[in-house]
Image: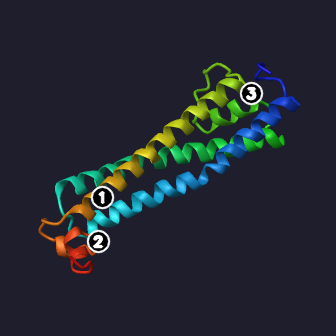
Amino acid sequence: MTDAAAALDDGDRALCAAVAAWLDAHAALAAWGLALSVTAVVALIGFALPGIAVAAALLGVAGLGLAERVLALRLRFDAGLFSALAGGTLPSLAALDSTLARMALRPAAAGPRALPDRVRGTLRLLRAHRAAVVLQTVLALSAAAWVACADDGPDADSYPMTRGALTQWIPA
């Protein structure tokens, strides 16, 4: 259905329910992104890091975490909106637009958007969120690899998994 003023039909409600479920399923990804961000901030604040590369990678994880959190918030909000559209709490796209305009989250003068356009926009946000979390993960793994390989840094002996620390446990 493309008419924003008309009530949603069964196919539209099914699409809204599927999108809401898909967004709910991605909540674990958002939790992983948050865990990476918190871990990076704790490591930056509380530990002596073996080099600038590790610090830069952790700063990247934390910085991407800000973007990840904004995207996760938007996706959580969209999940609620699609769920409300699917359940009939919001009877039409026009009612949604009116509500968003009253909340100052959408310009009142903005034209109507068809449901497929809204779904595409939400899926675009979801892809951006996934990309942020993947980049966070790559940077966090890079930082962990640099820490594991650091054997000549100023605090190399304080890291139990460094090559220098491992040689005392592995027979030559």
Question: Quick check: 74 left or right of 21?
Answer: left
Label 3 SS: helix
C-beta proximity under 8 Å, tags 2 and 1? no
Q: Earlier in the sequence, mark 3 or mark 1?
A: 3
What's the amino acid at mark 2?
A: Met
Question: Quick check: 44 left or right of 123?
Answer: left
Label 1 SS: helix
Residue of label 1: 145
Residue of label 3: 94
x then y, percent, for residue 123: 60, 34
x then y, percent, for residue 45: 27, 66
In this view, the residue in front, 61 or 147, is 147
x then y, percent, for residue 125: 54, 36
Q: Residue at x 38, y 47 (%)?
A: 64
C-alpha separation, residue under disc 3 versus residue under disc 1 = 52 Å
Placement of 90 over or under 116, stated as above or below:
below
Residue of label 2: 161
Disc number at residue 88? Answer: none
